[in-house]
Image: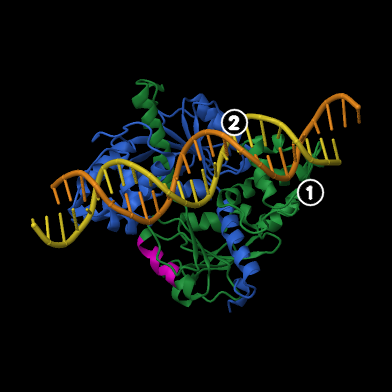
Chain colours: A green, B blue, C orange, D yellow
Amino acid sequence: MAESNRRGVPEATVGRLPGYLQALSTLAEQGRASISSEELAGLAGVRSAQVRKDLSHLGTYGVRGVGYDVARLAEQVSAELGLSRDWPVVIVGMGNLGRALASYEGLATRGFHVVALADNDPAVVGSRVEGMTVQALGDLRPDGPVAVGVITTPPHAAQEVADVLVGLGVHSLLTFAPGVLEVPSDVDVRRVDLATELQILTFHQHQRAVAVPGSGVEEVS
Amino acid sequence: MAESNRRGVPEATVGRLPGYLQALSTLAEQGRASISSEELAGLAGVRSAQVRKDLSHLGTYGVRGVGYDVARLAEQVSAELGLSRDWPVVIVGMGNLGRALASYEGLATRGFHVVALADNDPAVVGSRVEGMTVQALGDLRPDGPVAVGVITTPPHAAQEVADVLVGLGVHSLLTFAPGVLEVPSDVDVRRVDLATELQILTFHQHQRAVAVPGSGVEEVS
DNA sequence: TAGATTGTTAATCGATTAACAATC
DNA sequence: TAGATTGTTAATCGATTAACAATC
């Protein structure tokens, strides 16, 4: 019983683990020794039953009547996410967004290390960003393995970039370009689309305005 | 029968509508008159049954044996998302990310209009970004209503910014800062966290490496 | 022991998918 | 009509939640 399903952590749970980890890291810094599922739920914005269920997928690390050991749980979640090692990242597309990510401290502090930057624009290639020389996409030769490729190019270039990255042996892509990327089945793609996020927000706002006329953005002074 | 549930579009469906709309817009530009659920599914990266089920929530707009009218469907999806009007957006936090979003064309082309920029850093306040003067957070006075507030500040400032925006009457927030925001229940918050996305990717990669040793990033030359 | 809190069960809910009758 | 494709049903799957026995 005790050692529950070590494999097969549900996707929905995986999506919440980073949030738990972030809360636990903050707690650890504050010197907190233990925490209940109730309080952790509050910090992560979910329900306590959900926290307990999620954590049960990692094995059992709480103590009945007491709660979870903050340091131990942080370490466990971190290990589950594969964060005990450092992950080399390449960013392709040195526009505003690419530069923003290249200088994002949230990466380094969470085990991600930018090892190369690339772009296709001759005017940008060769320039220095965050202490690194921007390489031409075609000549991209990261010295060492690359775990994650981040695509911050305009939409029309995204597929070509994906092809190059896959050719270099990258198995995980994070793209900010709209549209579906065609990649081999052993390549994992996640997409972040700002316009999609905004459209989901405005859908809800639109619904509220339709449901209760006058309660929408119209009445804001 | 025909007029199905006009209210209560499932959240999962809402999350896919922007993707359909993007594909439909491209098709419309190409002059395509109609499209089958099968082809639209391919373009959006989902299954055809899912497309048909999703669209059935908007009412019925396909023709059996023929498919969907591209222009008509695009208009319908657009209306459902509330995109027939223009949405005024404020961006707070003029670091790299904030500047990237301020100059992001994907916003304007999809009905979002940046009406004000703000920051708390005196060194940044008063400077001009994309033709707009950056305002101090405390003095933020958008001339006109604001539909969506985008928070691109460091994590520690996010809650204060949220409070200010809520005080201005903003009901939809998009934040790039990690951590939960405390807001009134009538305020809708969406969070995009780059580190979370990367951690989900590395979880999968880590799993693969554990399952099939040697198949992970290690073997990339 | 008494109080607190976990880990797990079982019920519920929502989302996905295949299949096919309806129908253009 | 014959072929194509929708809209909907029903089965399945996965995720959430409340409740509570186990137990520190």
Q: Which residue is mark 1?
A: A71
Label 2 sits on a secondary structure element that is: loop
* Residue at the spot 63% in from the left edge and 45% down from the top edge: A19
Q: Badge 1: how crowded within 10 Å, few (<14), some, or many (20+)? A: some
* Residue at the spot 58% in from the left edge and 43% down from the top edge: B177
- Asked whether, in this view, residue C6 is left or right of residue A151, the answer is right
Q: Which residue is mark 2?
A: B182
* Chain letter behind tag 2: B
Q: Position of residue B56 (x, y in %)?
A: 30, 42
Majority secondary structure of magenta residues: helix
**Quarter of the C terminus of chain B within the rendering:** bottom right
Vertical position of residue B160 compared to residue B201: above or below? above
* Residue at the spot 19% in from the left edge and 49% down from the top edge: B64
Q: Which residues are magenta?
A: A156-163
Marks 1 and 2 belong to one chain: no
Of B126 and A198, nearer the camera is A198
Q: Position of residue A160 (x, y in %)?
A: 39, 69
